[in-house]
Image: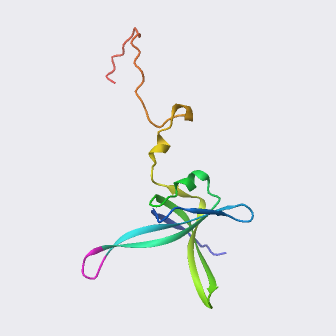
Amino acid sequence: MAFSLNKVQLIGNLGKDAETSFTTSNLAVTKFSVATTRGKKTKDGNWENETTWHNIVAFGLNDFIKDQLKRGAKVYVEGRLDYQQYEKDGQTKYYTSIIADSNGIIPLDRKESNYSGSSDSGGSFTESAPAQDDTSEEKDDLPF
């Protein structure tokens, strides 16, 4: 068998909030679009941005990832190209999408609410200085 590869990697921003539906076998299907932008030089020598929209389909995403997929959020997507065709009004229509890998979606925007947990949430990502123990008889001579 000949070697082949169908792999796509994108970093871009969501155009709108992701939408999740369920198949008849209760598998979650999440769909969203991602915009990627690149600069290109026009014929008159000026630079302009060119935006390309990509349709993403992901199966079985966990709730944490789905909650991060909001309009404008920056996201990394890894998956494979998928081509579909269908008939509409007697014409053949073509649809290209990216089927995301199960671990191929990584939110890149850090939400502050996720990183400043309370003490009863199992820990916090914020550090505080340790309390000074003034009753200690020995003082370290270390400058830090």
Whether the magenta-drawn stretch holds residue 44 is answered as yes
Q: Is residue 25 left or right of residue 107?
A: right
Q: How is the image coloured?
A: rainbow
**Foreground residue among 50 and 32:** 32
Residue 24, x across and y down, in percent: 74, 65
Q: Residue furthest left?
A: 45
- Main SS category, magenta section: loop
Q: Is residue 133 above or below residue 10?
A: above
Residue 31, x across and y down, in percent: 58, 66
Q: Residue furthest right?
A: 25
**Foreground residue among 141 and 89:** 89
Q: Residue furthest top?
A: 137
Name the quadrant containing residue 80: bottom right
Whether the magenta-drawn stretch holds residue 61 is answered as no
Give the residue displayed 40% in from the left and 72% down from the top.
Answer: 51
**Foreground residue among 5 and 19:** 19
Q: Is residue 45 above or below residue 136?
A: below
Q: Is residue 42 above or below residue 26?
A: below
Name the quadrant containing residue 136: top left
**Foreground residue among 68 and 46:** 68
Q: Is residue 74 left or right of residue 93?
A: left
Of the 4 image quadrants, the one containing the C terminus is top left
Q: How many marks?
A: 0
Residue 83, x across and y down, in percent: 59, 77
Residue 67, x across and y down, in percent: 55, 53
Give the residue displayed 56% in from the left and 35% down from the top.
Answer: 121
Magenta region: which residues? 41-47
Of the 4 image quadrants, the one containing the N terminus is bottom right
